[in-house]
Image: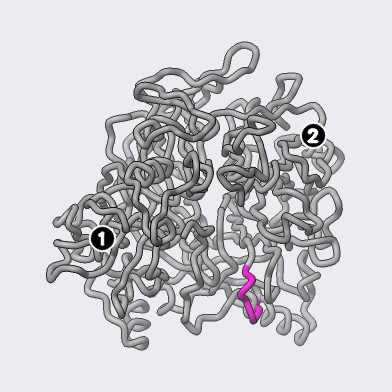
Amino acid sequence: MFGNGDELPSNRSANPHIQDVINAGRRKVLTSGAAVGALAFLGGLPAITNAAAPATDRGLPFQRRTRLPFGAVSITRADTVTVPSGFSATAFIPWGTPICGSYPAYLEDASNSAEDQAQQTGMHHDGMHFFPMDAKFKGRKSDHGLLALNHEYIDVPLLHRNGATVVNGKRVDADEVRKEINAHGVSIVEIRRNARGEWAVLPSARNRRITGASPMRIEGPARGHDLMKTRYSPSGTSARGTLNNCANGYTPWGTYLTCEENWAGYFASRDSELPRHLRRYGLPSTSRYGWETIPGDEFQRFDATATAEDFRADYRNEPNTFGWIVEIDPFDPDSTPVKRTALGRFAHEGLVFAPVKPGWPVVCYSGDDSQNEYIYKYVSRDRYRPLRSDGQLLDDGTLYVARFNPDGSGDWLPLDIENADFQQACAAANVEFANQGEVLINTRLAADIVGATKMDRPEWGAVHPDTGEVYFTLTNNSSRRDTDAANPRAPNPYGHIIRWREEGRSHTGVRFQWDLYLLAGPQNDSRDPRGKPLTEENILASPDGLWFDNDGRLWIQTDMSGSQLSDGPFGNNQMLVSDPRTGETKRFLVGPQGAEVTGITATPDFRTLFVNIQHPGEGSTSTEYTSTWPDGAGRRPRSATVIISRDDGGRVI
């Protein structure tokens, strides 16, 4: 109980792994004597043609002047947020900040009630986005807006005054469990910057908490499916709550997307044999937090055991209502969040859109953050119409999964029951799906069947604003035994960044060209975008968060744990900036002890950068803290957003 929540590997398919693909590509190039591209250190994988060249240089003399005008931050294990000279970092809206309702104050001894927590910022900040107050129009207002942020999971020992109350392996305090459920989800906060550059929370009707118990609507092909029907929603059209919200996205029409990642561990099933829609997602026999051991319907929904003759009389299907992308209108506090099932069901780590074009379908990408899982692309059926389109574009379309080939090419394989190739793959595998809703509830199985490439925990994605190239972090994979072209190390403790360029005039096609952008690791086992070993100013491990600013600089955040944090050469988790034009990469920020650096957004004028610091002091107990950030000595650690600005008030970089 109360483990780290990472999913256990559940992909038993014989599909090739990305490391196998990379190795095959290396052997092919070495055998043929072909010329090597930018990634010569891998033995010759072809680089994307002109991938480092921008669509326009905007008049910048980038060959003579760095686009990273700051001194690289040194590796450190200090219990603070470290940024370059000339910059300031200020903690903002930490866990427990009152934002709505009666605005109950945060109590240092963690004695706040479940009701209090439902009116305060949740625990463990993750992905976020800043919405200017004019976001649905010009989107240029930089001193006033809504900050929407996820809360991924909880540290139970810190959430309660004396930790959780457990008797004979069962939870016995219902209010404690409600508080834990309420500490999950999403916070939406209206904020304003004054003339001195200081930000404050406004007491606004728009401020809102969405928790693990908030009502949700189900839309898309899985709406009303028998596998979505529960005692709570016999029609299969609604659900309760969103959990383990990791990374995020935002739509061209001004809404927020929160992503349900490692949700399977919140449930338990005592059934001797699990159906494929639970087995393929690694549903355990005992849950992570033991919520289902408390009596009452609000807690029994986490018990997925079949206890009745009819699936509408128990919660065997409750796990099927999780693992989706959830759309939220941040400007309408009365709106109901929507689970968009056309985007697939898996451990979503973010959703990133390709540049939108009026009259074209929308295209977006998402990774399945678990060892040996896949990368997906969605293409809407209908076309984008500015000021007219809305979330219905995410209900009808085609979900694809990626296959990376050894020669540097790639294919998008449709997971569409009407597609002849998909039908043929299902027949060959002797697997049947009744309809598209069942395909999407079983997204991982469908991807297994068509032969997708297993990846090293695909996490955040980002799309270059000028070139349209797509970048994804592959954080690490300690269980890998074999290699391929796209995953070149076995095991892969340090991770890497992969990128691709879609073929054709838009991102809607089914072919792409790919290469590796960066191989993380220590100086003796790494390569930067120029093919050179990383140095003291940019060594990193376990790349996770990824974001492009409007000038095409790539911001990279890390999520190291265990020995990499405690005694490795990397120090605390960090955030770096990399310039794809030149390959120059520098460390910009180092977080406090035990923390993950995750989530990033900025104001349109780029004078304020928001970054999230998650689980500082990870591993702390209710009485012994391994970090006291951000409140100082003797205070329990709290996840928080950090506001970063230049001391001279100018653009961040």
Relative to 307, is 204 on the left or the right? right
Q: Mark 1 near mark 2, Cβ–Cβ under 8 Å?
A: no
Figure quadrant of the C terminus? top right
Quarter holding residue 495: bottom right
Structural distance between the alpha carbons of marks 1 and 2: 48 Å
Q: At which x and y percent is residue 438?
A: 27, 69
* Majority SS type along the magenta span: loop
Q: Secondary structure at mark 1?
A: loop
Q: Which mark, residue 84?
A: 2
Was residue 390 drawn as part of the magenta stretch in this picture? no
Q: In this view, which residue lies farthest toward the front?
A: 168
Which label lies toward us, 1 or 2? 2
Q: Type of residue at label 2?
A: Pro
Residue 371 or residue 565, whichever sits in front: 565
Circle nearer the N terminus (1, 2): 2
Give the answer, above or below, for where 261 lies relative to 161: below
Residue shown at 32% from the left, 29% from the top? 332
Residue 317 at x, y percent in the picture: 25, 64
Q: Disc number at residue 222? A: 1
What is the magenta range?
477-484
Kindly tell me whether residue 414 is visible in this rendering.
no
Q: Amino acid at mark 1?
A: Ala
> Residue at position x 43%, y 31% from top?
120
Label 2, secondary structure: give it. Answer: loop
| Front in this rendered view, residue 508 or 529 | 529
Q: Quadrant of residue 186?
A: top left
In the image, taking residue 203 as reference, residue 69 lies left or right, namely right
Is residue 423 visible in the rendered structure shown here? yes
Other residues around mark 2 within 10 Å, as few (<14) / some (14–19) / many (≥20): some
